[in-house]
Image (spheres, grey):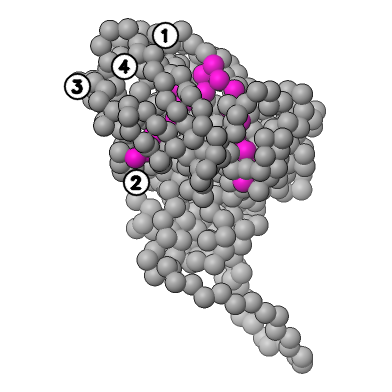
Amino acid sequence: MKILQTIAASSLSLVGCSGILSYEGPLPSLPPSPAPPAVSCRYATAATASSSADLSGTNVMSVNVGSGALCGTRDNFPCTSVTICPVGSSTGCQTISDILVDTGSFGLRIFVQALNPTFCETLQQVTDDSGNAVAECAMFGSFNVWGSVLAANVQLGGEAPVKASIHLIDKNFATVPTACAQVGTSPQSAGYNGILGVGLKQSDCGTTCETVATNNMYYNCTRAGTCTGTALKMIDQVTNPVALLPVDNNGVLLDLPSVPGLGSPSVTGSLYLGIGTRTNNAVGSATVYTANSLNEFQTVAFSQTYGKSFIDSGSNTLSIPTNSGLATCTGGLAAFYCPTGAPLSLTASTTGLPSGNTGTVSYSLANAQGYPAGNHVFGNLGSVMSFGLGDTAWIWGLPFFLGRRVFVGIQGKSSVLGMGPYWGY
């Protein structure tokens, strides 16, 4: 799932300045900072027990598609488990299952209902320079998520925990801004306990949010619950935890097996942390496809050029515009493609942007009405492009990953495949 960042028109022209002010004499008396609203852990449930962090050192995270209490109820949801701890501690932690692995976003987001209430209270609320609580609205293609920003130690696989800002999804935190309508409400409605964004960037906003208060992502919230837009230092923004690892920090490799033409009930694969840092994440013969500043590259298919393309494990289909000429389904499956006959064997070309390598991608599309009941993993499921992206967008969703080793190189991090951002396959 791709985070959509929108900046208010008033921020189009910016003037920056910096300097150090020196003051000699007695310090003025300052009023006390307002206390931030408490983390709303009262809405959490004690569904998962606390634990200690695993410090075994492995850089592998198991990824399951079609299984899990929540993810197993949905099609093509790749999920893993993540352990979070209080800052500065590797004990008194909690491991949360059913976390969606998402190469289209950046940072860890967890529904408040997935946390043990007592554990939740140990996490630190991130505040701005005035002591107000920081909250975030993350805008995805079809929904938004709202809630406070917390500091925690995050452990991925057996790596050492790293301190990171995470997003606690909680529609009841303070007052949801008008710009953040249609917010996600619960793990049950979403189909997962949270999202692990391991995409192309180190943080979910970047330098823009450091200087622009009207960024429509970050807000400061007073004790009374009033929230207004705020700029936020990079160090406090919700961070891709992979980028914080001591060694395996330049990206990830998502390796999932292929499935038969009519799908499979479930599959298990691996998310390898780092690219070319160990023998298990060696790049082999992968080709690099660079992404531009919008985290996009180019796809050419059906004699059309789709310049707003991206690779996204958090999208459960191949999302293709209707100008492809493919036959769509009818009735309740009208949002999906239903080519007649046997599954179509197709090819497309992908090209890195702003300039880069070009290669051929082989893929398949099947009739979405012909899958047998009980299967939840499909390598040829296609849907009609939506989310307002138009006829120039193409999303290589979860079917693209099945049977293909896909590398995701993080911006500003170097590997044997080059400097990110890029995809490799």
State the image coordinates of residue 383 (x, y, percent, origin top left).
Answer: 33, 26
Which residue is located at x 52 percent, y 75 percent?
15
Q: Earlier in the sequence, mark 1 or mark 2?
A: 2
Mark 2 and 3 residues: CB-CB less than 8 Å, in contact?
no
Q: Nearer the viewer, residue 363 or 198?
A: 363
Q: Along the polypeptide, which appears first: circle 2 or circle 4? A: 2
Q: Which one is in front, 131 or 369?
A: 369
Among numbered discs 3 and 4, the one appearing first in the sequence: 3
Q: Which residue is mark 1?
A: 261
Asked if the stretch drawn in magenta spans residue 179, the answer is: no
From the viewer's perspective, is the residue at label 3 or at label 4 nearer? 4
Residue beneath label 4, please? 368
- Residue toward you, 31 or 423: 423
Looking at the rendered structure, the kind of residue marked 4 is Ala
Q: CA distance from mark 2 to mark 4?
A: 28 Å
- Residue 163 location (% of width, % of height): 70, 48
The residue labelled by disc 3 is 331
- Give the mark nearer the N terminus: 1 vs 3: 1
Q: Residue furthest right?
A: 56
Q: CA distance from mark 1 to mark 3?
A: 23 Å
Looking at the rendered structure, the secondary structure element under dot 3 is: helix
Q: Residue at x 40, y 41 (%)?
A: 307
Question: CA–CA distance between discs 2 and 3?
Answer: 25 Å
Mark 1, Cα crowd under 10 Å, few <14 / some 14-19 / many 20+, is some
Q: Indicate the amino acid at tag 2.
A: Gln
Q: Which residue carries the number 2 mark?
A: 182
Eye-nearest disc, 1 or 2: 1
Q: Which residues are magenta?
A: 392-411
* Cα distance in 3D space between marks 1 and 4: 11 Å
Rendering coords of residue 175 (x, y %): 41, 58
- Quadrant of the image containing the C terminus: top right
Could you tell me if residue 235 is visible in this image? yes
